[in-house]
Amino acid sequence: MTTITLTDAQYQAILSDFYAPQEKRARLSQSEVVAIANSLNKKIDIPIFFSEDQEQKILVKIVTKIDGFLYENLPNEVYDLIRSLPEGIDDEEAQRIVRSFSKLANEKINIPYLPEVAEYVAISFVINVIVNAMRKQWDLGKALDAFDDIQQPDNNESGWDFPSD
């Protein structure tokens, strides 16, 4: 068993990250949020009549809300794997995270202007893309490309098809 040793600075950095104020509780960059929102826009349609510009802003807010949820519930050291090609989680672990986090997020996140099925599709899509980007030899671009051709689930019981290499 390994003994944990931290300098005071390392420990303070962990605490600062863990107790970050709400506006800093995000891991995705602006370009990553927009890329995911653009991909999500192809999968769902917000039923309230909005212009495409307004809908895009709403989708960015949805992705940002899910990013905050993942910040709260997933260690940042794991979340940061979306930017690491050689490191990453294996396929089995990715599938486990997707299943458990999609259900948990759907319970915790409420998007009242979306029907429940569309809410689940949006939440599970964003989580699937992000978690697949954490896989070994994957990144966000590869995950977004993989989900371009995958059809959305019909209900909250069925999940997205899991993309292969």
Image (tube, rainbow, N blue to C red):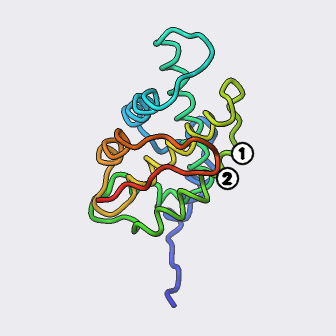
Q: Which residue is mark 1?
A: 108
Using residue 74 as the reference point, say whether residue 52 is left or right of it: left
Distance CA(mark 2)–CA(mark 1): 6 Å
Q: Residue at x 58, y 42 (%)?
A: 68
Image quarter of residue 136? bottom left
Q: Is residue 28 above or below residue 137?
A: above
Using residue 144 as the reference point, say whether residue 125 is left or right of it: right
Q: Residue at x 59, y 35 (%)?
A: 23
Q: Residue at x 35, y 41 (%)?
A: 149
Q: Which residue is mark 2?
A: 104
Image quarter of residue 50? top right
Instruction: Tell me the element at label 2.
Output: helix
Q: Is residue 104 above or below residue 24?
A: below
95 or 133: nearer the eye?
95
Residue 111, image x and y in percent?
A: 68, 31
Residue 64, image x and y in percent?
A: 54, 34
Q: Residue at x 40, y 66 (%)?
A: 91
Residue 134, image x and y in percent?
A: 40, 57
141 or 24: nearer the eye?
141
Give the residue type that dot 2 points to. Leu
Instruction: Tell me the element at label 1.
Output: helix
Proximity of marks 2 and 1: CB atoms separated by less than 8 Å: yes
67 or 47: nearer the eye?
47
Give the residue type that dot 1 points to. Lys
Using residue 8 as the reference point, say whether residue 165 is left or right of it: left
Residue 58's tag is none
